[in-house]
Image: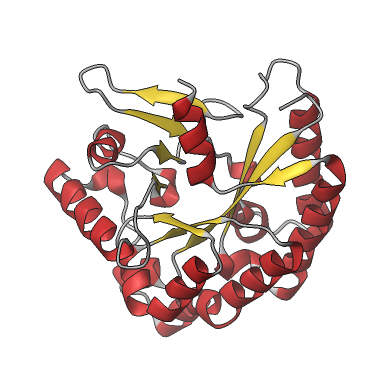
């Protein structure tokens, strides 16, 4: 990969109404999560198909159980499904026993839709001190929950033989923060996401093969009409810049092979 080349991971947290159900919220709040199912995810899949892009979807185990046809459709369109907890739990509040139980259960559920689950993203980006090691022991090869860099880096566990690739996240590259928390306009969102893309493309301290960006989207958020148009516009712009759109599992396999 030369300085003028860049890879982009478009990722989508398909958590639907899992968090609202776990927190026993009222019907109005639950319906916000259901927007992902009724409208958000179909719009995203249509947009990805329009641009001939393969993406990564972080899916809760409970969501895969409740909406198996949608989960199956994601896989049938050759997108990656990765783990996002079972019921969108706060992993930093769990015992090591509960974490392992959730990881094993979620992995088992998701493997009913695809041969292997390669990656994990923590709900709310919250981890315990055990979370990543437990996923590594379960056979996962990458995580996407940390913020220590602006391109992928290696995670290793000295007492173990396992290694993982970290695809770092950032709040300003997360649609929920931009649109739901701060209620920014479409133009503000587009400018933030475009400027970071342009800057990473030109950064001289990023080695060839590591000029890889990671955006975090949610069907219940980006799927709204004016917001999906922002993503459409962003993709169209990135395609003019020699961009390769990649699934995280493919990048992680390549990076680990070269280690």
Of residues 73 and 216, the one drawn nearer to the viewer in this rendering: 73
Q: Quadrant of the N terminus?
A: top right
Q: Quadrant of the C terminus?
A: top left
Could you say where residue 200 lies in the image, as x and y percent from the top left?
74, 30
Side (left or right) of 232 relative to 99: right
56 is higher (above) or lower (below) than 46: above
Q: Which residue is located at x 43 percent, y 50 percent?
A: 124
Could you say where residue 60 lies in the image, as x and y percent from the top left?
37, 62
Q: Which residue is located at x 58 percent, y 56 percent?
A: 55
Image quadrant assignment for residue 242: top right
Side (left or right) of 88 relative to 176: left
Q: How is the image coloured?
A: secondary structure
Could you say where residue 16 lies in the image, as x and y percent from the top left?
45, 71
Side (left or right) of 104 relative to 49: left
50 is higher (above) or lower (below) than 216: below
Q: Which residue is located at x 49 percent, y 23 percent?
A: 258
Q: Which residue is located at x 24 percent, y 60 percent?
A: 108
Image quadrant assignment for residue 163: top left
């Amino acid at each position: 990969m030369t300085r003028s080349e860049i890879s982009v991971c478009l990722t989508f947290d398909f958590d639907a109404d899992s968090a609202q159900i776990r927190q026993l919220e009222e019907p109005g709040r639950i319906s916000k999560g259901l927007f992902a199912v009724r409208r958000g995810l179909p719009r995203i899949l249509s947009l990805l198909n329009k641009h001939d892009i393969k993406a990564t979807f972080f899916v809760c185990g409970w969501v895969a159980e409740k909406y198996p046809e949608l989960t199956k459709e994601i896989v049938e369109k050759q997108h990656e499904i990765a783990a996002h907890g079972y019921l969108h739990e706060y992993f930093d509040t769990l015992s090591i026993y509960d974490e392992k139980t959730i990881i094993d259960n979620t992995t088992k559920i998701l493997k009913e839709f695809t041969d292997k689950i390669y990656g994990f993203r923590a709900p709310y980006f919250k981890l315990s001190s055990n979370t990543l090691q437990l996923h590594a022991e379960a056979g996962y090869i990458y995580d996407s929950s940390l913020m220590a860099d602006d391109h992928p880096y290696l995670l290793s566990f000295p007492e173990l033989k396992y290694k993982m690739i970290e695809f770092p996240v950032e709040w300003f590259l997360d649609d929920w923060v931009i649109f739901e928390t701060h209620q920014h306009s479409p133009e503000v969102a587009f400018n933030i996401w475009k400027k970071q893309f342009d800057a990473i493309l030109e950064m001289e301290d990023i080695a060839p093969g590591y000029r890889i960006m990671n955006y975090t989207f949610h069907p219940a958020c980006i799927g709204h009409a004016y917001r999906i148009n922002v993503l459409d516009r962003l993709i169209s712009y990135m395609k003019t810049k020699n961009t390769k759109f990649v699934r995280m599992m493919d990048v992680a396999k390549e990076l680990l092979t070269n280690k």
